[in-house]
Amino acid sequence: MNKPNLSKSKYCKAKQCNKILWLDKYKAEEATDIGNESVLENGTKVGELARRYFGKYTNIEFNTDLSKMVSDTEKELKNIPNIITEASFNFDNNFCSVDILKNDIDGIEIYEVKSSTSIHDIYLDDVSYQYYVLHNLGFNIKSVHIMYINSEYVRNGELELDKLFNIEDVTKIAISKQNEIQEKIKEINEYMLEYDNEENEPEKKVSMNCFDPYECAYWNYCTKELPKNNIFKIRLMHKDKKFKLYNEGKISFEDVLYEDINEKYLEQIDFELNDKETKIEKDRIRDFLDTLSYPLYFLDFETFQQAIPEYDGVSPYMQIPFQYSLHYIEKEGGELKHKEFLAEAGIDPRRALAERLVKDIPKNVCVTAYNMSFEKTVIKKLAETYPDLSEHLLNIRENIKDLMIPFKERYYYCRAMQGSYSIKYVLPALFPNDPELDYHNLPVVHNGGEASFAYSDLVNHTKEEQEEIRNGLLVYCGLDTLAMVKVWEKLKEIN
Protein backbone atom coordinates (compact mmCIF):
# COMPACT_ATOMS: atom_id res chain seq x y z
CA MET A 1 0.00 0.00 0.00
CA ASN A 2 1.60 3.28 -1.15
CA LYS A 3 1.48 6.15 1.28
CA PRO A 4 0.83 9.70 0.09
CA ASN A 5 3.85 11.98 0.15
CA LEU A 6 3.78 14.38 3.09
CA SER A 7 5.70 17.59 3.66
CA LYS A 8 5.95 19.83 6.69
CA SER A 9 3.55 22.34 5.12
CA LYS A 10 1.03 19.60 4.41
CA TYR A 11 1.47 18.23 7.91
CA CYS A 12 0.75 21.65 9.39
CA LYS A 13 -2.32 22.03 7.19
CA ALA A 14 -3.57 18.68 8.44
CA LYS A 15 -2.98 19.78 12.05
CA GLN A 16 -5.51 22.49 11.32
CA CYS A 17 -7.88 20.22 9.38
CA ASN A 18 -7.32 16.96 7.50
CA LYS A 19 -9.84 17.97 4.88
CA ILE A 20 -7.62 20.81 3.69
CA LEU A 21 -5.27 18.19 2.20
CA TRP A 22 -8.19 16.46 0.46
CA LEU A 23 -9.46 19.79 -0.89
CA ASP A 24 -5.98 20.78 -2.09
CA LYS A 25 -5.80 17.53 -4.02
CA TYR A 26 -9.29 17.31 -5.48
CA LYS A 27 -10.92 20.76 -5.22
CA ALA A 28 -8.07 23.25 -5.42
CA GLU A 29 -10.06 25.46 -7.79
CA GLU A 30 -12.50 26.16 -4.93
CA ALA A 31 -9.85 27.91 -2.84
CA THR A 32 -10.29 31.64 -2.27
CA ASP A 33 -7.22 33.82 -2.58
CA ILE A 34 -6.70 35.12 0.95
CA GLY A 35 -2.99 35.80 0.58
CA ASN A 36 -1.46 39.18 1.30
CA GLU A 37 1.42 40.09 -0.99
CA SER A 38 3.07 42.25 1.67
CA VAL A 39 3.00 39.38 4.16
CA LEU A 40 4.54 36.99 1.63
CA GLU A 41 7.19 39.53 0.68
CA ASN A 42 8.11 40.13 4.34
CA GLY A 43 8.36 36.38 4.93
CA THR A 44 10.72 35.97 1.98
CA LYS A 45 12.93 38.86 3.12
CA VAL A 46 13.13 37.55 6.68
CA GLY A 47 14.07 34.07 5.48
CA GLU A 48 16.81 35.40 3.23
CA LEU A 49 18.23 37.64 5.95
CA ALA A 50 18.19 34.90 8.59
CA ARG A 51 20.51 32.85 6.41
CA ARG A 52 23.26 35.41 7.05
CA TYR A 53 22.89 35.16 10.82
CA PHE A 54 25.44 32.36 11.21
CA GLY A 55 27.80 33.53 8.47
CA LYS A 56 28.76 31.65 5.33
CA TYR A 57 26.27 29.05 4.17
CA THR A 58 25.39 26.73 1.32
CA ASN A 59 21.85 26.81 -0.05
CA ILE A 60 20.08 23.79 -1.49
CA GLU A 61 18.30 25.11 -4.56
CA PHE A 62 14.61 24.30 -4.92
CA ASN A 63 13.77 21.58 -7.41
CA THR A 64 10.37 20.13 -8.27
CA ASP A 65 12.16 16.79 -8.14
CA LEU A 66 12.46 16.61 -4.36
CA SER A 67 14.83 13.65 -4.58
CA LYS A 68 17.35 15.99 -6.24
CA MET A 69 17.19 18.30 -3.20
CA VAL A 70 17.71 15.30 -0.91
CA SER A 71 20.73 14.06 -2.87
CA ASP A 72 22.22 17.58 -2.99
CA THR A 73 21.83 17.77 0.78
CA GLU A 74 23.55 14.42 1.27
CA LYS A 75 26.57 15.73 -0.61
CA GLU A 76 26.76 18.91 1.47
CA LEU A 77 26.45 17.02 4.75
CA LYS A 78 29.83 15.43 4.03
CA ASN A 79 31.44 18.85 4.50
CA ILE A 80 31.85 19.31 8.26
CA PRO A 81 31.39 21.82 9.81
CA ASN A 82 29.04 23.85 7.63
CA ILE A 83 25.76 25.72 7.50
CA ILE A 84 23.14 24.47 5.03
CA THR A 85 19.94 26.33 4.19
CA GLU A 86 16.94 24.45 2.84
CA ALA A 87 18.63 21.14 3.70
CA SER A 88 16.15 18.52 2.53
CA PHE A 89 15.35 15.07 3.86
CA ASN A 90 12.93 12.24 3.23
CA PHE A 91 11.96 9.49 5.67
CA ASP A 92 9.29 6.97 4.70
CA ASN A 93 7.76 9.47 2.22
CA ASN A 94 7.77 12.26 4.82
CA PHE A 95 9.70 15.16 3.32
CA CYS A 96 10.99 18.35 4.92
CA SER A 97 13.38 21.18 4.21
CA VAL A 98 15.13 22.78 7.17
CA ASP A 99 15.42 26.58 6.98
CA ILE A 100 18.88 26.60 8.56
CA LEU A 101 20.85 23.50 9.58
CA LYS A 102 24.11 23.76 11.51
CA ASN A 103 26.15 20.66 10.75
CA ASP A 104 28.99 19.82 13.11
CA ILE A 105 31.07 16.77 13.91
CA ASP A 106 29.06 15.99 17.05
CA GLY A 107 25.60 16.49 15.53
CA ILE A 108 23.23 18.98 13.94
CA GLU A 109 21.12 21.94 15.04
CA ILE A 110 17.77 22.83 13.43
CA TYR A 111 16.62 26.45 13.05
CA GLU A 112 13.12 27.24 11.80
CA VAL A 113 12.74 30.89 10.72
CA LYS A 114 9.46 32.77 11.18
CA SER A 115 8.60 36.35 10.28
CA SER A 116 6.24 36.57 13.27
CA THR A 117 7.06 38.43 16.48
CA SER A 118 6.03 35.53 18.72
CA ILE A 119 5.96 31.73 18.75
CA HIS A 120 2.69 30.02 17.89
CA ASP A 121 1.72 26.40 18.50
CA ILE A 122 1.77 25.60 14.79
CA TYR A 123 5.45 26.59 14.66
CA LEU A 124 6.15 23.95 17.29
CA ASP A 125 4.32 21.37 15.19
CA ASP A 126 6.43 22.46 12.23
CA VAL A 127 9.82 21.96 13.93
CA SER A 128 8.65 18.80 15.70
CA TYR A 129 7.81 17.27 12.32
CA GLN A 130 11.31 18.16 11.12
CA TYR A 131 12.79 16.56 14.22
CA TYR A 132 10.74 13.42 13.51
CA VAL A 133 12.08 13.10 9.95
CA LEU A 134 15.72 13.73 10.83
CA HIS A 135 15.69 11.66 14.02
CA ASN A 136 14.29 8.65 12.17
CA LEU A 137 16.99 9.05 9.55
CA GLY A 138 19.53 8.53 12.34
CA PHE A 139 20.83 12.08 12.78
CA ASN A 140 22.12 13.18 16.16
CA ILE A 141 20.04 16.29 16.76
CA LYS A 142 21.69 18.46 19.38
CA SER A 143 19.01 21.12 19.50
CA VAL A 144 15.97 22.60 17.78
CA HIS A 145 15.28 26.35 17.62
CA ILE A 146 12.78 28.86 16.34
CA MET A 147 14.12 32.17 15.05
CA TYR A 148 11.58 34.98 15.04
CA ILE A 149 11.44 38.76 14.92
CA ASN A 150 12.15 40.85 18.01
CA SER A 151 9.39 43.48 17.99
CA GLU A 152 11.32 45.61 20.51
CA TYR A 153 14.26 46.14 18.20
CA VAL A 154 14.72 49.70 16.91
CA ARG A 155 17.14 50.20 14.08
CA ASN A 156 19.86 52.79 14.48
CA GLY A 157 22.63 52.58 11.92
CA GLU A 158 23.61 49.20 10.52
CA LEU A 159 21.16 46.34 10.91
CA GLU A 160 22.06 44.23 13.94
CA LEU A 161 20.96 40.67 13.25
CA ASP A 162 21.65 39.52 16.80
CA LYS A 163 19.13 42.09 18.04
CA LEU A 164 16.62 41.76 15.20
CA PHE A 165 16.12 38.04 15.78
CA ASN A 166 15.05 36.18 18.89
CA ILE A 167 16.15 32.55 19.04
CA GLU A 168 14.32 30.14 21.34
CA ASP A 169 15.42 26.59 22.10
CA VAL A 170 12.40 24.29 21.74
CA THR A 171 14.24 20.95 21.77
CA LYS A 172 12.34 19.53 24.74
CA ILE A 173 9.01 20.42 23.19
CA ALA A 174 10.00 18.82 19.88
CA ILE A 175 11.04 15.62 21.62
CA SER A 176 7.84 15.53 23.68
CA LYS A 177 5.75 15.71 20.51
CA GLN A 178 7.29 12.72 18.72
CA ASN A 179 4.57 10.20 19.57
CA GLU A 180 1.97 12.77 18.59
CA ILE A 181 3.73 13.34 15.26
CA GLN A 182 3.89 9.63 14.52
CA GLU A 183 0.19 9.13 15.30
CA LYS A 184 -0.82 12.17 13.27
CA ILE A 185 1.15 11.00 10.23
CA LYS A 186 -0.57 7.61 10.48
CA GLU A 187 -3.96 9.35 10.76
CA ILE A 188 -3.26 11.54 7.71
CA ASN A 189 -2.17 8.59 5.60
CA GLU A 190 -5.25 6.57 6.54
CA TYR A 191 -7.51 9.55 5.91
CA MET A 192 -6.17 10.24 2.43
CA LEU A 193 -6.35 6.57 1.51
CA GLU A 194 -9.92 6.30 2.75
CA TYR A 195 -11.04 9.35 0.77
CA ASP A 196 -9.02 8.59 -2.32
CA ASN A 197 -11.01 10.19 -5.15
CA GLU A 198 -12.97 13.31 -6.04
CA GLU A 199 -16.38 11.67 -5.59
CA ASN A 200 -15.55 10.34 -2.13
CA GLU A 201 -15.62 13.67 -0.28
CA PRO A 202 -15.23 13.50 3.51
CA GLU A 203 -17.83 15.21 5.66
CA LYS A 204 -16.51 17.89 8.00
CA LYS A 205 -18.39 20.46 10.02
CA VAL A 206 -16.90 23.91 10.14
CA SER A 207 -15.32 24.91 13.45
CA MET A 208 -12.92 27.38 15.00
CA ASN A 209 -10.19 25.38 13.24
CA CYS A 210 -11.32 27.10 10.05
CA PHE A 211 -9.61 30.24 11.38
CA ASP A 212 -6.96 28.79 13.70
CA PRO A 213 -4.07 29.07 13.20
CA TYR A 214 -4.86 30.50 9.76
CA GLU A 215 -7.97 31.52 7.88
CA CYS A 216 -8.83 28.61 5.60
CA ALA A 217 -9.06 29.27 1.86
CA TYR A 218 -11.97 26.82 1.59
CA TRP A 219 -14.34 28.57 3.98
CA ASN A 220 -16.75 29.61 1.24
CA TYR A 221 -16.76 26.12 -0.22
CA CYS A 222 -17.35 24.40 3.12
CA THR A 223 -20.22 26.76 4.02
CA LYS A 224 -21.92 26.79 0.62
CA GLU A 225 -24.85 24.70 1.89
CA LEU A 226 -25.62 27.05 4.78
CA PRO A 227 -28.58 29.44 4.46
CA LYS A 228 -27.78 32.75 2.81
CA ASN A 229 -28.54 34.55 6.07
CA ASN A 230 -26.50 32.45 8.49
CA ILE A 231 -24.94 33.36 11.81
CA PHE A 232 -21.50 33.69 10.26
CA LYS A 233 -22.82 36.76 8.43
CA ILE A 234 -23.50 38.57 11.72
CA ARG A 235 -20.86 41.20 11.34
CA LEU A 236 -19.74 42.14 14.85
CA MET A 237 -20.28 38.88 16.71
CA HIS A 238 -17.14 37.08 17.93
CA LYS A 239 -16.31 33.84 16.15
CA ASP A 240 -16.44 31.74 19.32
CA LYS A 241 -20.01 32.92 19.94
CA LYS A 242 -20.95 32.11 16.34
CA PHE A 243 -19.57 28.60 16.58
CA LYS A 244 -21.27 28.05 19.93
CA LEU A 245 -24.63 28.85 18.31
CA TYR A 246 -23.74 26.79 15.24
CA ASN A 247 -22.94 23.75 17.36
CA GLU A 248 -26.29 24.17 19.11
CA GLY A 249 -27.99 23.95 15.71
CA LYS A 250 -28.83 27.67 15.57
CA ILE A 251 -27.61 28.52 12.11
CA SER A 252 -30.00 30.85 10.29
CA PHE A 253 -30.97 34.38 11.26
CA GLU A 254 -34.42 33.04 12.14
CA ASP A 255 -32.84 30.54 14.56
CA VAL A 256 -31.34 33.28 16.72
CA LEU A 257 -34.14 35.87 16.64
CA TYR A 258 -35.06 35.17 20.25
CA GLU A 259 -31.59 34.49 21.60
CA ASP A 260 -30.12 36.64 24.34
CA ILE A 261 -27.58 38.38 22.11
CA ASN A 262 -26.35 41.92 21.58
CA GLU A 263 -29.00 44.32 20.30
CA LYS A 264 -26.77 45.33 17.39
CA TYR A 265 -26.69 41.71 16.19
CA LEU A 266 -30.46 41.56 16.47
CA GLU A 267 -30.77 44.85 14.62
CA GLN A 268 -28.80 43.49 11.65
CA ILE A 269 -30.97 40.36 11.65
CA ASP A 270 -34.19 42.38 11.92
CA PHE A 271 -33.25 44.66 9.02
CA GLU A 272 -32.26 41.74 6.82
CA LEU A 273 -35.31 39.57 7.48
CA ASN A 274 -37.86 42.37 7.36
CA ASP A 275 -36.24 44.65 4.79
CA LYS A 276 -36.76 47.58 7.12
CA GLU A 277 -36.46 51.19 6.07
CA THR A 278 -33.33 53.13 6.88
CA LYS A 279 -32.90 53.96 10.55
CA ILE A 280 -32.04 57.65 11.07
CA GLU A 281 -31.67 59.23 14.49
CA LYS A 282 -31.70 62.88 13.42
CA ASP A 283 -31.07 64.43 16.83
CA ARG A 284 -27.97 62.34 17.45
CA ILE A 285 -26.67 62.97 13.95
CA ARG A 286 -27.24 66.70 14.44
CA ASP A 287 -25.39 66.59 17.77
CA PHE A 288 -22.47 64.87 16.06
CA LEU A 289 -22.38 67.37 13.18
CA ASP A 290 -22.36 70.22 15.71
CA THR A 291 -18.97 68.97 16.91
CA LEU A 292 -17.51 69.78 13.46
CA SER A 293 -16.56 73.27 12.36
CA TYR A 294 -15.08 75.20 9.42
CA PRO A 295 -12.50 75.14 8.03
CA LEU A 296 -13.15 71.40 7.81
CA TYR A 297 -10.48 68.90 6.74
CA PHE A 298 -10.87 65.23 5.71
CA LEU A 299 -7.67 63.22 6.23
CA ASP A 300 -6.61 59.69 5.31
CA PHE A 301 -3.17 58.05 5.56
CA GLU A 302 -1.76 55.04 3.77
CA THR A 303 0.99 53.10 5.52
CA PHE A 304 3.19 50.09 5.00
CA GLN A 305 5.13 47.80 7.32
CA GLN A 306 8.61 46.30 7.19
CA ALA A 307 9.45 43.11 9.00
CA ILE A 308 13.08 44.15 8.58
CA PRO A 309 13.32 47.88 9.36
CA GLU A 310 15.20 49.73 6.64
CA TYR A 311 15.25 53.16 8.30
CA ASP A 312 16.62 54.51 11.56
CA GLY A 313 14.08 54.76 14.36
CA VAL A 314 11.86 52.06 12.88
CA SER A 315 10.83 48.83 14.63
CA PRO A 316 9.65 45.65 12.91
CA TYR A 317 6.09 45.97 11.60
CA MET A 318 5.78 49.61 12.62
CA GLN A 319 3.20 51.48 10.55
CA ILE A 320 5.17 53.79 8.24
CA PRO A 321 3.05 56.48 6.56
CA PHE A 322 3.97 57.14 2.94
CA GLN A 323 0.89 58.94 1.61
CA TYR A 324 -2.07 61.04 2.58
CA SER A 325 -5.07 62.61 0.92
CA LEU A 326 -6.65 65.79 2.23
CA HIS A 327 -9.95 67.24 1.08
CA TYR A 328 -11.02 70.46 2.79
CA ILE A 329 -13.65 73.20 2.80
CA GLU A 330 -12.67 76.57 4.24
CA LYS A 331 -16.13 77.94 4.99
CA GLU A 332 -19.77 76.97 4.79
CA GLY A 333 -20.80 76.78 1.16
CA GLY A 334 -17.14 77.01 0.15
CA GLU A 335 -15.39 75.17 -2.66
CA LEU A 336 -14.15 71.63 -2.03
CA LYS A 337 -10.36 71.64 -2.37
CA HIS A 338 -7.82 68.84 -2.37
CA LYS A 339 -4.18 68.35 -1.42
CA GLU A 340 -2.17 65.14 -1.43
CA PHE A 341 1.25 63.72 -0.70
CA LEU A 342 2.95 60.58 -1.99
CA ALA A 343 6.56 59.88 -1.08
CA GLU A 344 9.23 58.93 -3.57
CA ALA A 345 10.09 55.25 -3.85
CA GLY A 346 12.88 53.65 -1.84
CA ILE A 347 13.33 56.34 0.83
CA ASP A 348 12.20 56.90 4.40
CA PRO A 349 8.99 58.81 3.67
CA ARG A 350 8.19 60.03 7.18
CA ARG A 351 10.04 63.35 7.43
CA ALA A 352 8.85 64.66 4.08
CA LEU A 353 5.30 63.57 4.84
CA ALA A 354 5.32 65.19 8.29
CA GLU A 355 6.68 68.48 6.92
CA ARG A 356 4.02 68.61 4.23
CA LEU A 357 1.27 67.69 6.67
CA VAL A 358 1.97 70.65 8.96
CA LYS A 359 2.01 72.93 5.90
CA ASP A 360 -1.24 71.55 4.56
CA ILE A 361 -3.20 71.53 7.85
CA PRO A 362 -3.14 74.74 9.93
CA LYS A 363 -3.28 74.65 13.71
CA ASN A 364 -6.61 74.64 15.51
CA VAL A 365 -8.76 73.51 12.60
CA CYS A 366 -11.28 70.69 12.65
CA VAL A 367 -9.95 67.50 11.04
CA THR A 368 -12.04 64.42 10.38
CA ALA A 369 -10.90 60.87 9.82
CA TYR A 370 -12.81 57.64 9.39
CA ASN A 371 -11.78 55.44 12.33
CA MET A 372 -9.62 58.18 13.76
CA SER A 373 -7.58 55.92 16.09
CA PHE A 374 -5.41 54.95 13.13
CA GLU A 375 -4.70 58.52 12.00
CA LYS A 376 -4.10 59.64 15.59
CA THR A 377 -1.61 56.81 16.15
CA VAL A 378 0.30 57.68 12.98
CA ILE A 379 0.49 61.37 13.91
CA LYS A 380 1.55 60.62 17.48
CA LYS A 381 4.43 58.48 16.24
CA LEU A 382 5.50 61.21 13.81
CA ALA A 383 5.46 63.75 16.65
CA GLU A 384 7.67 61.49 18.77
CA THR A 385 10.10 61.04 15.89
CA TYR A 386 10.36 64.72 14.91
CA PRO A 387 10.36 66.94 18.03
CA ASP A 388 10.68 70.14 15.96
CA LEU A 389 7.30 69.35 14.35
CA SER A 390 5.76 67.87 17.45
CA GLU A 391 3.71 70.85 18.65
CA HIS A 392 1.95 71.32 15.32
CA LEU A 393 1.45 67.58 14.74
CA LEU A 394 -0.07 67.08 18.20
CA ASN A 395 -2.33 70.07 17.63
CA ILE A 396 -3.66 68.38 14.49
CA ARG A 397 -4.09 65.16 16.43
CA GLU A 398 -6.01 66.84 19.26
CA ASN A 399 -8.51 68.30 16.80
CA ILE A 400 -9.41 65.10 14.95
CA LYS A 401 -13.06 64.00 14.97
CA ASP A 402 -14.24 60.54 13.93
CA LEU A 403 -16.67 60.48 11.03
CA MET A 404 -17.29 56.82 11.77
CA ILE A 405 -19.24 57.52 14.98
CA PRO A 406 -22.74 57.94 13.47
CA PHE A 407 -22.41 54.54 11.81
CA LYS A 408 -20.59 52.72 14.58
CA GLU A 409 -23.23 53.90 17.07
CA ARG A 410 -26.00 53.15 14.56
CA TYR A 411 -27.42 56.66 14.41
CA TYR A 412 -27.69 55.85 10.74
CA TYR A 413 -28.20 52.28 9.61
CA CYS A 414 -29.69 50.41 6.68
CA ARG A 415 -29.85 46.84 5.49
CA ALA A 416 -27.16 47.31 2.83
CA MET A 417 -24.55 48.00 5.51
CA GLN A 418 -24.79 44.31 6.51
CA GLY A 419 -24.02 45.03 10.15
CA SER A 420 -20.77 46.84 9.34
CA TYR A 421 -19.66 50.42 9.92
CA SER A 422 -16.59 50.13 7.69
CA ILE A 423 -16.57 52.82 5.02
CA LYS A 424 -16.23 50.07 2.41
CA TYR A 425 -19.79 49.02 3.39
CA VAL A 426 -21.20 52.39 4.40
CA LEU A 427 -20.27 54.13 1.15
CA PRO A 428 -22.02 51.76 -1.31
CA ALA A 429 -24.99 51.60 1.07
CA LEU A 430 -25.38 55.39 0.94
CA PHE A 431 -24.52 55.71 -2.77
CA PRO A 432 -25.46 52.40 -4.39
CA ASN A 433 -25.42 53.58 -7.99
CA ASP A 434 -22.48 55.99 -8.09
CA PRO A 435 -19.59 54.55 -10.18
CA GLU A 436 -17.38 57.44 -9.06
CA LEU A 437 -17.46 56.05 -5.53
CA ASP A 438 -16.99 52.38 -6.43
CA TYR A 439 -13.58 51.05 -5.34
CA HIS A 440 -13.94 48.17 -7.80
CA ASN A 441 -13.73 50.67 -10.67
CA LEU A 442 -10.32 52.00 -9.65
CA PRO A 443 -7.52 51.40 -12.18
CA VAL A 444 -4.69 49.93 -10.08
CA VAL A 445 -5.20 49.95 -6.30
CA HIS A 446 -8.49 48.87 -4.73
CA ASN A 447 -7.80 48.49 -0.99
CA GLY A 448 -5.31 49.31 1.75
CA GLY A 449 -3.42 46.03 1.44
CA GLU A 450 -2.84 46.60 -2.25
CA ALA A 451 -1.75 50.17 -1.53
CA SER A 452 0.85 49.05 1.02
CA PHE A 453 2.33 46.46 -1.30
CA ALA A 454 2.22 48.75 -4.34
CA TYR A 455 4.29 51.42 -2.58
CA SER A 456 6.79 49.04 -0.96
CA ASP A 457 7.29 47.33 -4.32
CA LEU A 458 7.68 50.53 -6.39
CA VAL A 459 11.47 50.29 -6.59
CA ASN A 460 11.17 47.00 -8.47
CA HIS A 461 9.38 48.61 -11.43
CA THR A 462 10.40 50.63 -14.46
CA LYS A 463 9.92 54.39 -14.52
CA GLU A 464 6.83 54.02 -16.69
CA GLU A 465 5.35 51.36 -14.42
CA GLN A 466 6.08 53.51 -11.37
CA GLU A 467 4.13 56.39 -12.85
CA GLU A 468 1.14 54.16 -13.46
CA ILE A 469 1.28 52.71 -9.94
CA ARG A 470 1.77 56.13 -8.34
CA ASN A 471 -1.25 57.43 -10.19
CA GLY A 472 -3.22 54.43 -8.96
CA LEU A 473 -2.16 55.15 -5.38
CA LEU A 474 -3.18 58.81 -5.66
CA VAL A 475 -6.57 57.92 -7.12
CA TYR A 476 -7.22 55.31 -4.42
CA CYS A 477 -6.24 57.48 -1.46
CA GLY A 478 -8.08 60.44 -2.99
CA LEU A 479 -11.25 58.37 -3.13
CA ASP A 480 -10.89 57.57 0.57
CA THR A 481 -11.22 61.24 1.53
CA LEU A 482 -13.72 62.08 -1.21
CA ALA A 483 -15.83 59.26 0.23
CA MET A 484 -15.64 60.93 3.64
CA VAL A 485 -16.82 64.21 2.12
CA LYS A 486 -19.76 62.47 0.48
CA VAL A 487 -20.68 60.73 3.73
CA TRP A 488 -20.53 64.03 5.61
CA GLU A 489 -22.71 65.70 2.97
CA LYS A 490 -25.22 62.86 3.25
CA LEU A 491 -25.41 63.33 7.01
CA LYS A 492 -25.95 67.08 6.53
CA GLU A 493 -28.84 66.45 4.12
CA ILE A 494 -30.72 64.64 6.89
CA ASN A 495 -30.96 67.83 8.88
Image: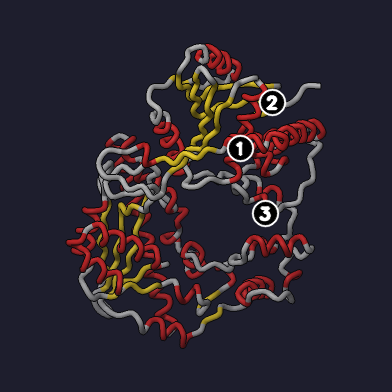
Name the residue carrying label 2: 5
Q: Quadrant of the N terminus?
A: top right
Horizontal side, residue 252 vs residue 86: left or right = right
Which three-letter amino acid code belongs to the residue tagged 2? Answer: Asn
Which three-letter amino acid code belongs to the residue tagged 3? Answer: Met
Horizontal side, residue 430 vs residue 220: left or right = left
Name the residue carrying label 1: 172
Tell me the distance, in whole angstroms, between the alpha carbons under discs 3 and 2.
Answer: 27 Å
Name the residue carrying label 3: 208
- Residue at the location (38% across, 47% down)? 316
Horizontal side, residue 192 vs residue 381: left or right = right
Is residue 314 depicted above or below 170 in this figure?
below
The secondary element bearing badge 2 is classed as loop
The secondary element bearing badge 3 is classed as helix
> Residue 483 occupies which quadrant of the picture?
bottom left
Residue 489 appearing in the image: yes
- Residue at the location (34% across, 71% down)? 368
The secondary element bearing badge 1 is classed as helix
Colour approach in the figure: secondary structure
- Residue at the location (32% across, 54% down)? 321
